[in-house]
Structure formats: structure tokens, C-alpha cells
Image (spheres, rainbow, N blue to C red):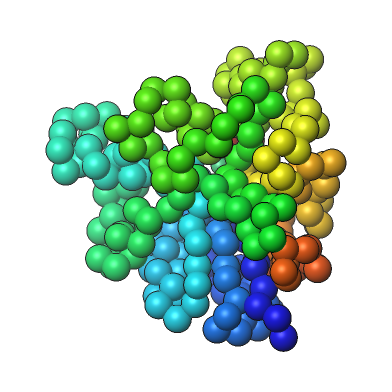
């Protein structure tokens, strides 16, 4: 069998479904897992997911794309080392402390090794957590939120982790500013960087990948009682996909961010 690149959507602490999915995939040592981010928060066992994946990464190539939930947790973690008063102002500081306490040293380190995007074999597909607005001319650096980068490039990195809706000029709209005439970014994306495989935006009503002309969404809302989805590529071409249905509804979909 040829080595596969297997892109996995938002896990959000759903360890049981993740393990079922990986079992279904029957990985060989040459297969690479590419996790689209948002491994943590909302669901039943964030620490279990990260500990398990960090251990799996010892025997399997795994690429972690950093989602907005990892970005926020890691921001809190850095403050907890340098400025505890500021860390305490984070809304979920108590749950972050609990998560940190449950992570193995190896898992905590592994979680800091994420990247903003990855170009897959063959060069045609890019894995990204949220999306890319049509106004972006150059991809930001692959490694997130380095303070040495210019503010503009850091902003672009942030967009890759958060983007949902855009205005008529293609500019990113924050979740609270969203209007009915704004469009989902993938409807307008022109393929300039290749075909994007993305998570972040939940399609609870779909049991299969959601297709746009130049983008494919695979967050099927496992934590909200939907499915955990994996898109499978060989030699740079999509060959199939796999899903596992959630065992239950772990979190209300109304808080979809
Ligand atoms: Mn997200």
C-alpha cells in the first residue's frame, strides 16, 4: 500500500471517537496523520486526546496544525509562566490549569510544535485550521505567532486560525460582526494557494466532507454529536474519506467558536 496522508478534522476532546477512527484507518508506519487543530476544549477528554496523540507521534509521522483553541491555551500557558496575573484573566483559566496538570511533559511539548499550515505531497493541497481570505497575497510563515514577525504577518497567521465570514471586499469579519450578506470565505476563495482542506467551521448536518470549488471542509461536529472525519490522500490526490459517528452530544452547538 502506498503511504497515505490522512487529514483529521476538529477533535475537541473526543478521545473515544478519535481512537475508533484511527483503528478504522489501519495505519501503516509510513502513513502521516495531519491534525487540523482544535484537539482540545468543549469535549470530554482534552488531556486524553493530547497525551494519546503525543505518544502515537513517537511511532507515526504526525503533523499538528494549530487551531484557535490551541493558540489560546498556549497563550495562556506562556502567560502562566511569565505573568500569572494576566493568565488569571483568561476566561477558562481554571479549565486550562486543569488541562495543563493532566498533560504529560512530552504532550505539553508536543502541543507547542504545531504549525499554521502544511502543503501536502504533490503541492496541490494545503491543510489549514480555519481558512484563507481572498485578500491574502502571501502565506504567513508556517510557525505561529512568533513575536519577531511583523504585525501584519502575525495577523495573517491569526486569520488562518479563525476565519469564517468575509465582506464584499474579501476582508475577514469577526464572529460578533457577522451580517446576513457576508459570505463564507470558501465560497469566494479563488484557489490561489491550492486546494484547502480545513476545519473550524462545523457542518453538523453533513455526514461527509463539505465541498467547495477550491476547498474541502471536514469538521463534521463530532463534539456536538456529529461525526469525526478524515480525508485520505495518496500521492497528492484524494482517494477516500472515513468517518466515525459521535457516541453522544458532548457540547451544545450554539457556542460554535
Ligand atoms: Mn476552531
Quadrant, the C terminus: top right
Residue 95: x, y in percent? 34, 47
- Relative placement, left or right, of 177 versus 92 is right
Ligand 1 quadrant in view: top right
Quadrant, the N terminus: bottom right
Instruction: Give the vertical position of 127 relative to 133 (above or below).
Output: below
Q: Residue at x 74, y 18 (%)?
A: 182
Q: Residue at x 65, y 62 (%)?
A: 121
Q: Residue at x 62, y 81 (%)?
A: 27
Instruction: Give the vertical position of 3 relative to 71 (above or below).
Output: below
Q: Residue at x 61, y 27 (%)?
A: 136
**Of residues 11 and 32, the one drawn nearer to the viewer in this rendering:** 32
Residue 81: x, y in percent? 16, 43
- Relative placement, left or right, of 37 versus 17 is left
- Relative placement, left or right, of 107 versus 251 is left
Say whether residue 248 is visible.
no
Residue 221: x, y in percent? 67, 50
Q: Quadrant of residue 225?
A: bottom right
Residue 51: x, y in percent? 38, 68
Q: How many marks?
A: 0
Amino acid at each position: 500500500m502506498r503511504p497515505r496522508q490522512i487529514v483529521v478534522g476538529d477533535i475537541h476532546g473526543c478521545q473515544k471517537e478519535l481512537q475508533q477512527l484511527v483503528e478504522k484507518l489501519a495505519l501503516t508506519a509510513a502513513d502521516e496523520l495531519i491534525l487540523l487543530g482544535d484537539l482540545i476544549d468543549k469535549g470530554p477528554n482534552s488531556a486524553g486526546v493530547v497525551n494519546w496523540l503525543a505518544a502515537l507521534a513517537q511511532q507515526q509521522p504526525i503533523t499538528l496544525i494549530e487551531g484557535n483553541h490551541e493558540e489560546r491555551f498556549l497563550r495562556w500557558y506562556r502567560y502562566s509562566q511569565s505573568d500569572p496575573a494576566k493568565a488569571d484573566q483568561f476566561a477558562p483559566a481554571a479549565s486550562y490549569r486543569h488541562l495543563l496538570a493532566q498533560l504529560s511533559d512530552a504532550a505539553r511539548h508536543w502541543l507547542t510544535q504545531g504549525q499554521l499550515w502544511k502543503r501536502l505531497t504533490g503541492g496541490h493541497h494545503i491543510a489549514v485550521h480555519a481558512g484563507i481570505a481572498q485578500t491574502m497575497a502571501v502565506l504567513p510563515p508556517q510557525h505561529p505567532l512568533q513575536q519577531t514577525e511583523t504585525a501584519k504577518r502575525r495577523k495573517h497567521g491569526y486569520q488562518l486560525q479563525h476565519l469564517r465570514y468575509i465582506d464584499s471586499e474579501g476582508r475577514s469579519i469577526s464572529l460578533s460582526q457577522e451580517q446576513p450578506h457576508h459570505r463564507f470565505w470558501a465560497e469566494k476563495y479563488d484557489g490561489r494557494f491550492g486546494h484547502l482542506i480545513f476545519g473550524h467551521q462545523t457542518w453538523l448536518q453533513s455526514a461527509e466532507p463539505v465541498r467547495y470549488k477550491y476547498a474541502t471542509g471536514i469538521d463534521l461536529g463530532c463534539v456536538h454529536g456529529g461525526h469525526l472525519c478524515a480525508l485520505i490522500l495518496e500521492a497528492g490526490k484524494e482517494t477516500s474519506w472515513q468517518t466515525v459517528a459521535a457516541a453522544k452530544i458532548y457540547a451544545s452547538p450554539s457556542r460554535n467558536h
